[in-house]
Image (cartoon, coloured by chain):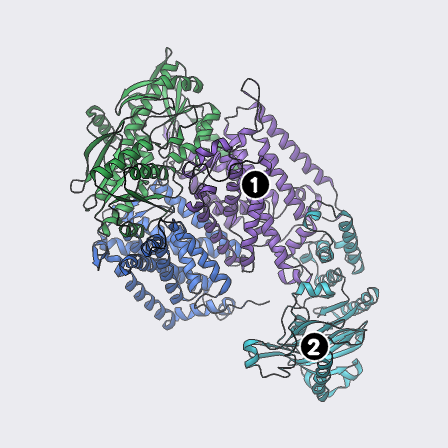
Chain colours: A green, B blue, C purple, D cyan
Amino acid sequence: MKKLIALLLAAIMLVPVFAMADDLPVLKIGVYEPASGDSGAGGKQETLGVQYANAKMPTVEIGGTTYKVELVMADNGSSTDKAPSAAQKLVSENVSVVLGSYGSGVSIAGSDYFKDAGIPAIGLTCTNPQVTAGNSHYFRVCFLDPFQGTVLANYAYKELGATTVYCLGELGNDYDQGLITYFKQAFEALGGTAIVDSFPNNTADFTSYLSNAQGYNADVFFCPVSLAYSTQIIQQASAQGMEIAILGGDTLDSNVVVDAAKGTTVKVICTTFYQEGANAEFDEGFKAWLNENPDMMTNNGGNDMISAVSVMGYDGYVTALAALQAAGSIKGADVMAALPAVEVDSVSGHIKFDGNGDAIRTSAFVKTVNNETGAWEFVAEQKVD
Amino acid sequence: MWDTIFPYLLSGVSVGGQYALIAIGYTMVYGILRLINFAHGDVFMVAGIIMVYIAASGLPLWLCIPLVLLITVAVGFLIERVAYKPLRSAPRMSVMISAIGVSYTLQNLVLYITGGLNKQYPKIPWISETVAIGAAKTKMVTIVTPFLVIALVVALVLLINKTKIGMAMRAVSKDFETSQLMGIKINNVISTTFIIGSFLAGVGSILFFTNYPTVIQTSGAMPGLKAFVAAVFGGIGSIPGAVIGAFIIGIMENIIKGLDVILFKLGVIEAPLGLATFSDAFSFALLIIILVVKPTGLFGEKVTDKV
Amino acid sequence: MNQKKSKKPMIITLVLVAAIYIGVFIAEQTMPATSMLFTVLKKGATYALVAVSMNLLNGFTGIFSLGQAGFMLVGAYVYGIFTIPVAQRAAVYQYFDGGVIQFTVPVIIAMIFAGLAAAFFAFLIGLPVLRLKSDYLAIATLGFAEIIRAIFQWNGLGPVTNGSNMLRSFPSFNDFNIVGADGKVAVYLSTLIPFIMSGVCILLIVLLINSSYGRALKAIRDDEVAAEAMGINLAHHKRLAFCVSSFFAGVGGAMLAMYQTTVQAKSFTSAMTYEILLIVVIGGIGSVTGSVLSSFLFVACSEWWLRFLDEQQMIGDFQVPLLRNGFRLVVFSVIIMIVVLFFRRGIMGDKELPDLLSRRSKSKGRAVK
Amino acid sequence: MSEKNMTMPAEPLQENNNQPAAEPGKDEVLRLENITMQFGGVVAINNLSLKVDRGEIVALIGPNGAGKTTAFNCITGVYEPTNGIVYFHGKPIVVNHPQGKMAKQYGGINGDLYKNRKPVVHTPDKITHMGIARTFQNIRLFKSQTAFENVLIGTHLRRTSNMFTAAFRLNAKEEKANREKAMNLLEIVGLAEVADELATSLPYGKQRRLEIARALATDPTLLLLDEPAAGMNPQETDELGEFIVDIKNRFDLTVFMIEHHMNLVMDISDRIYVLDFGKQIAEGTPEEIQKNPVVIAAYLGVDEE
């Protein structure tokens, strides 16, 4: 028995030796994203943005030398207990900077590992303030939940004329719970009532929660949950013939959601970072790239619709390169030092960090699903001052 | 008030029916092998995945469904032959560990195949249509389920009481060794049990995933455990017991999800207590109460083991 | 175990163990702290303790319990709750304005609390379920773990448990490193400390197993009726084993918290218990040494050695087929099934390192349980 | 004989009425009073009454299925008798009368004899604690442990240490004493040289002796032997006979044994009780029993394996 295992391991240890060397010096960027679990779909789409950027800008010139940029992927399995080893994997590969993650919980879970290794991290779509709060190594290119929560609350109250909102989040998901809390604050400040409810993870049967919303006579069903759950909720809502609108955060901005809502009567609205069409050049390039790579297409949910998380992935990569160049070194510490001053104009707009390391964002896009055509429709660009 | 509770009952009945179909598999296997087949819930999940891929391959649905059931049955049969048969003489603990191993393997296999992403379950015409019952709207499957379950159970009970193999099953579940000595082909009986169990799990998965149409490797775990609880609750070895237990659990857990609203409507509480958190835990609380108070369950007959 | 038996193997064992500890210490000072090796060692040490604690029940007392994850959860939470710096609490308990507990206790005390809390839950659970037969007991304990999980996630307890949100910024393994004046780490202890922690705990368990009580537990495992006829009080001894096992599971939970740097109830699922059970099985039911060895093997394979299976590999220009995210776990579970089916005695059977070293071990060859 | 059987219940009955806590002769070790054990419809023991005095070797014989082992199980607390009292050194250690459902459907003898007495139930370990040790008809050794460890476990119940003192080896003196005691016992039963062998790897006869050694380790005053000579050849049986007498004297024991080997029984026992179909059909010295027609009838054609 022991022999068997020993042999097996010996064999395993040998394999990586065959990895090919490259003539250009290599610079590693860690991609810390869920490829499996509840947020797997979103994580893959976000990763696509990074991969596309890497395909477009495979090399970068830093301090006179040109480096080949190599992406090191680590699947954090959308769960806080798998996160540490994923983070540790990136650290052990000596990446210069980490991009990610989709989902705030795993970002927080990985944070300390990057911190201890002195590697800066750039959050792409983790919107919970706690990710960057009280640390100097975590940055973020997207907006924050207090902002998004306010935007959603305003929209629900003013545009949808809602007075009662039923909020449903997943137990133990920091993104859901955070956004719901800020939404509740903002919405009740406006004079509405928000009822908060949670479901245990791996829930499939949402019918009773939908009944709850009706039971409370809610005007809006607010569920900023992972794609795994939001699709379920939409389909079951249509089965129960629910009239009230389903409102969600940036996680809902995905073609998976569109497919679920297509052909139903369920009204799905969400806030997001980017509206397809705002940057024609990127759109075309990205779609073309997807169509060339079938497995990328599958990772994007089977069609070439652009979800905002991909854009954020792209922008994160751009920001990272800018930081590397500004640092003039591939040492994590130097990059960390350079990041606060970095400013870039990219697909999702102008990116500049505030004292917390959060990109200063003043506007979010609101979009809704067209149930016939099965496409996102731009509703409004919401600003909060 | 009734209008408030009715939707929960509806959800409860439909999910209960689906639990029932899984629970029967548990109760039969336990009745014969005294083994908690931890992998049964995963067989149910695998059935769902198979449907996803077969339907994606573009076969017509009327062909998909029988095909899915066939493959599911094959899977169940193989599991028994590969993972349990070699351990026939081994202590119970090793068999149970093997069952856990199988469950682990199936989940990881599906994780690998699906890449860890939720898969959309194909829409099966008729049963996924929406119908209105009074105020509440629901899918056709919700109404179909209980009747289908009852029909299947009746058929099963007939099979067990009227046919030769059924008699053999009863004999084996009464006394394994003796019936072996009496020349009953134990392995055939056990295989048949697994085949029936997997078949029902397959049917259950079709109903379940039509209602809640996404499949992921963990989809089977919770329904599996709850179905087992149902089986114990109804009395291990008793098929009607399993079915009744399943319906009770299905209804209760949905009532609990809605308890906040109900109490809210009754004016007992002003703000929700978040009791929905306990919708899963409740089943297990019930399990433990039953095990402690009446280990034989509602309809189980006493199993006397020799001192 | 007989006084006539030579002490030599014992001494060799102790020397080996000491050598390992020294090796760990040296490795930590010399090798880069970012190496995957240390992650494996830290997590391995944690799992080793939990696996041994489970083995005490399933292997030495013959109680088939599947509650381990639940007790780890209790331990992890209690540790977190009592060690999060007061300054940080406002941030951690952001939705429960800082929570109710506004003090901290030293790490060691917190770990003991963690163990005691887990043992207390075990005591409560044990009262009803320990009377149950093998697999009913298993499913009941599994259920209890799920219930505990739900309780800790309930927002009603938010001010204490932070509801379903994660606990974080409590002392982690890395905080054991001694930082010099220059802000750089002077002495690395982040791997040695967990080794010492679980080493001490495992030593305690071994001492118990080899004491008069340990023999009584083994007697219960072998034959309850005979054990009772020898005047061994079944209920008392089973409860004892259950509480002790849970105590150390709780301590293990606290260590897991330190390793993960964050704690969240939702990750303590039955899947975690299954993993630990499989570790015990691979190591050999009834062998402490086995559990320890297989913990490190298991962690190393799943976190490190087999990770390459999750990524596309090129050998020359040839792309190795099948390698894709998740393949690692497939290979892994197949290995486990092979062990479960064909190597049921696991790595060590029910032997310990000293048995292997002693010449007598031949005559002591034991039957499969 | 049979009228004796009828009169037996009478005396304890009066006894209970005037003095509930029976006060028998002080050299009486064990007394069964109207013990009846009923499993569902089956009456395994029917109103069995017997006594064993200090220093005696008393045998309980009877055809297979006569309820001998059931009697042992009632004494040692494995079963709770449907009705009757077991006195040990004059103290009632088991008291029961038909309860609940049993009370109604139970038509047996003396059903209401002990109505006025509170049932006393002890788990087997308590009874072992009081000083009754037993061996098993189908050997029940701890299979994963050595002969030495098997005996050592027998010393556990007299421990003064608790879990912590034991784990931290604060009970070293006691531990040492126990180990010596165990080794000593192994020498007495002549198994010293196989001390480190797995119990289950020993030959049959040695396993039986080991079981006795293990029982002795619990410091009993009464030793219950369930077919100690089962499966032994005549020579081994004779040795066993001497051995039993020897340990009886050495440890000042009282021995109550179930046995099929008549030569053994006739050789060493002072008195013999004969059971058939759960009823006591005879009692007396070996000579009386050998002459007793009822016994011969009961045994007619019953081979003594």
Give x and y (percent) for residue C339.
Answer: 51, 46
Task: Determine if residue C212 is in view.
Answer: yes
Q: Residue type at mark 2: give it.
A: Glu
In three-dimensional space, the C-alpha distance between marks 1 and 2, rounded to whole angstroms, equals 56 Å
Task: Please give left or right for residue C86 compared with residue C358 in the image.
Answer: left
Give x and y (percent) for residue B27.
Answer: 42, 62
Split into 4 quadrants, where in the image is the N terminus of chain A? top right
Q: Chain of mark 1?
A: C
Between residues A338 and A38, which one lies in front from this camera angle? A338
On screen, C137 above or below B294?
above
Task: Please give left or right for residue B150 compared with residue A266 in the image.
Answer: right
Q: Chain of mark 2?
A: D
| Marks 1 and 2 belong to one chain | no
Q: Which residue is mark 1?
A: C48
Task: Determine if residue B40 is in view.
Answer: no
- Residue at 48% of width from left, 24% of height from top? A117
On screen, D204 above or below A55?
below
Q: Nearer the viewer, mark 1 or mark 2?
A: 1
Give x and y (percent) for residue B239.
Answer: 39, 66
- Label 2: how many residues lie within 10 Å, few (<14), some (14-19) or many (20+)? few
Residue farthest to the left, as pictured: A372
Q: Which residue is mark 2?
A: D304
